[in-house]
Amino acid sequence: MCTGIPGGRGVTYKLFGLAFESSYRFQSLPVGSGTPDISFFELQAPLDPREDSEQLHSWQIDPGVDWLAVSRARTGYCLRFPRLADFLVTQAGNKVYGFCAETASRATFEHLVLDQVLPRALSLSGHCILHCSSVVTPRGAIAFAGKSGQGKSILASSLALAGYPLVTDDCLLLQSVGGHFMGVPSYPSVRLWPEDTLDFPRHGIEVTRVAHYSSKQRLRIGRGAISFAEGPAQLGVIYMLSTQPGAERDERISIERLSPHEAFIELVQGSFQLDLSGAESLRTHTTELCAVANTVPMFRLCYPRNRVLLPEVMRAVLRHANSVPPQVDSVWPSRN
């Protein structure tokens, strides 16, 4: 699928609590140490499209236009972002190779590696990663899940600006420890729409472009008023975001408990997974998400997308999180 695969050591970074070695220099990552858990190598040529491969799935932004196409071949998994980049992920998920097309900026390439490819690669080695933003509060880590554009990042970054350390902007890696789930910090960055970044530069937070094809902007956390979580934090509550129709006019905030069955379905839809075609990987992934649904209380948060009301939403979330009792129900009915 690709020839002349590079080798050799590069820089070691810290990402998702792991040692991430790369021949490519990432601007957004803190330097780390240790034996690499996962490695990335930049390719000087695109992947060979002639090698036989099995098409697994694709995502489309516009009808008939692939945003990401995933296939599986003998050498690993091929992830193609047409006209932007090609990536090869090994079967074990511990090595990733990427080629940046001339039509893509370096910022775009870095975004695709960190926010699209690596979370999927880590799923191959058994890591459970949810599409969530998260901060640390006195209740533990609280996470915001939901579809793109529903406000996960602006809620998390606003809470972080208010003094609650950021755990992650978009990808929450979970670790099971002593019957609890810990949220592991990803890397110190947040991606927001331009209208949501207006308050951040005056707090000394650097704002840059995420990708050449998007108007979204990246906040570099840890260089201003927002702190980044120093280590894993026990996950206390997950909020599934759901904006109301006519949200600019509606000022209501509602928080409703999801049953473990409902929570499980939402978690399945909101988890990063590269390949679920194997029975064993499907069983492992399902078991992990069942455990999360049984252990972590989950609620549907419906709120107005009105920036003026954002402080009120934040206060409502914090009050509610502090009052949530532990999860006691079960996804599956008892056999007794």
Image (tube, rainbow, N blue to C red):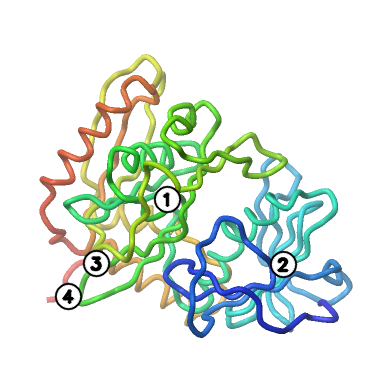
Badge 2: residue crowd in 10 Å (few <14, some 14–19, many ≥20) = many
Q: Which residue is mark 4?
A: 335
Q: CA distance from mark 2 to mark 4?
A: 45 Å
| Quadrant placement of the N terminus | bottom right
In this rendering, position of residue 293 left or right of residue 57: left
Q: CA distance from mark 4 to mark 3?
A: 9 Å
Which residue is at the far right?
Answer: 50
Q: CA distance from mark 3 to mark 2?
A: 38 Å
Residue drawn 40% across and 18% down? 248
Is 312 located above or below residue 267 in the figure?
A: above
Q: Nearer the viewer, mark 3 or mark 1?
A: 1
Q: Which residue is mark 3?
A: 332
> For this rendering, which residue is in front, 61 or 207?
207
Is 203 located above or below residue 178 in the figure?
A: above
Q: Which residue is mark 2?
A: 87
x, y (%) of residue 280? 47, 82
Badge 4: residue crowd in 10 Å (few <14, some 14–19, many ≥20) = few
Of mark 3 and mark 2, the one earlier in the sequence is: 2
Amino acid type of disc 1? Answer: Gly
Is 97 located above or below residue 244 in the figure?
A: below
Asked if disc 3 and disc 2 are in contact, CB closer than 8 Å, the reply is: no
What secondary structure is found at the residue carrying circle 4?
loop
Q: Nearer the viewer, mark 1 or mark 4?
A: 1
Residue drawn 24% across and 31% down? 254
| Quadrant placement of the C terminus | bottom left
Of mark 1 and mark 4, the one earlier in the sequence is: 1
Asked if disc 1 and disc 4 are in contact, CB closer than 8 Å, the reply is: no
Amino acid type of disc 4? Answer: Arg
Of mark 1 and mark 2, the one earlier in the sequence is: 2
x, y (%) of residue 229? 34, 57
> For this rendering, which residue is in front, 34 or 80?
34
Badge 3: residue crowd in 10 Å (few <14, some 14–19, many ≥20) = few
